[in-house]
Amino acid sequence: MIQVAVLGYGTVGSGVVEVIEKNKAEINKKSGEELNVKYILDLRDFPGDPYEDKVVHDVNMILDDPEVKIICETMGGLKPAYDFTKKALSLGKSVCTSNKELVAAHGPELIRVAHENKCNYLFEASVGGGIPIIRPLNYSLTAEKIDAITGILNGTTNYILTKMDREGADFEAVLKEAQEKGYAERNPEADVEGYDACRKIAILSSLMCCKNVKYEEIYTEGITKITATDFVYARAMGRTIKLLAQSKEVDGKLFAMVAPFMISRDNPLYMVNDVFNAVCVHGNMLGDSMYYGKGAGKLPTASAVVSDVVDCARHIGKVIMCFWDDEDVKVSDVSEARRAFFVRVDVAKEKEAIDTFKSVRVIEADVEGEFAFVTDVMSEKEFNEKADAVGIISRIRMEA
Ligand SMILES: NC(=O)C1=CN([C@@H]2O[C@H](COP(=O)(O)OP(=O)(O)OC[C@H]3O[C@@H](n4cnc5c(N)ncnc54)[C@H](OP(=O)(O)O)[C@@H]3O)[C@@H](O)[C@H]2O)C=CC1
Ligand SMILES: N[C@@H](CC=O)C(=O)O
């Protein structure tokens, strides 16, 4: 029997215990041995919970127990998760995590500590909730030179944008719903300001480059400035608005960013709605492949954590390869990236906007007092200079 401990009995942690219990026949068969949750670490007690007798408050009970071979870290945050994880790995206990903040900040170091101690640090649930994406990058696409990854990587913001688009719903009310459903981060600013998607694309970019992409270097914009009027224009263009996380290697340079984009009906990400996420991966031999599923929520995320537990159980005392060195990759300045932009200006600035941007495609959407258009493809730098000269209401980047 392999003893498992869960750190943090919240949304994901309680899901991990539920998945291990409900699917024990499948999981034990695939692990090659029976798994048992011996401890649950949390700050609180859970009177009446079927697993209340397993709840402990001192992490050392887990770290000092030689029977515990696998730990699920579902507490979140950097502290004390980093210390607990590093200590566990240095004792040869594998750690499976959903904590993307920690993976993005300390991934290569924790992977190295794990491998030095013949155990594993696995993080399938850290990107895309229940979607298998880390394992495909590490195992399945190993014959590829991956040169681009684009995804909808945050369930909360996709849920909000979908409801704004379909129902004209109010931002704050839908965010509250997403929190109640257990999708949002403890501090939902991480979702709506794009920080969570930024950490996730940093993890995927690192696996794409096999080196370390620092999330702090990735240009990030959230969805807080997106309004109902933006969706009126999007519909007029046969488009919708999605928070995209992108990473692309062009001529040996890495471009990465997170921002809202106007995407067309032809884009496979157009159909990705509600809490669903999707990741499009481009490889030089395979071309495009896409990975789709629920990007947040208790059981989908827990399922991904438990898939890592099974992998660790099958590899006790052995290292599972992960191609993520600690050498940093430079992320190119976003001002060099080139694209078209959708722009809204006050109607009084119509002539000035046309004179400044020259060739524009006018968007008719019957919005009073405004003039809206799509620019030619230009660099972000050139666009910003022109937009500053005219004084615009807002802009959203265009994607095919
Ligand atoms: N929710 C989701 O859909 C997804 C979440 N994640 C990630 O998974 C992690 C967990 O998220 P989630 O389950 O939603 O968060 P929750 O806040 O629901 O759960 C975290 C749990 O950990 C406990 N905890 C916090 N600090 C400590 C500590 N020092 N010692 C013991 N227990 C502690 C909390 O206790 P208390 O409440 O008392 O503070 C809480 O019960 C985060 O990193 C999140 O980003 C990843 C993918 C999806
Ligand atoms: N808050 C996150 C949870 C999963 O990573 C999200 O909404 O995607």
Image (cartoon, rainbow, N blue to C red):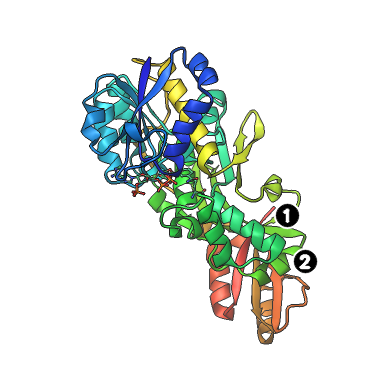
Residue appearing at x 73%, y 54% in the figure: 264
- Local packing at callout 2 (Cα closer than 10 Å; few below 14, some 14-19, many 20+) is some
- Quickly name the residue at label 1: 264
Q: As drawn, is 356 to the left or to the right of 26?
A: right
Q: Confirm whether residue 368 shows in the render.
A: yes
Residue appearing at x 56%, y 55% in the figure: 157
Q: Quadrant of residue 59?
A: top left
Q: Quadrant of residue 225?
A: bottom right
Residue appearing at x 55%, y 32% in the figure: 132
Q: Nearer the viewer, residue 19 or 383?
A: 19
Q: Nearer the viewer, residue 138 or 314?
A: 314
On screen, residue 331 above or below 356: above
Q: Is mark 2 within 8 Å of ligand 2?
A: no
What's under tag 1, amino acid-wise?
A: Ser
What's under tag 2, amino acid-wise?
A: Ala
From the top left corner, tell me how far across and down residue 370 is, in percent. 69, 80
On screen, residue 84 above or below 221: above
Mark closest to the chain's N terminus, 1 or 2: 2
From the top left corner, tell me how far across and down residue 62 is, in percent. 26, 29
Q: As drawn, is 62 to the left or to the right of 202?
A: left
- Quickly name the residue at label 2: 236
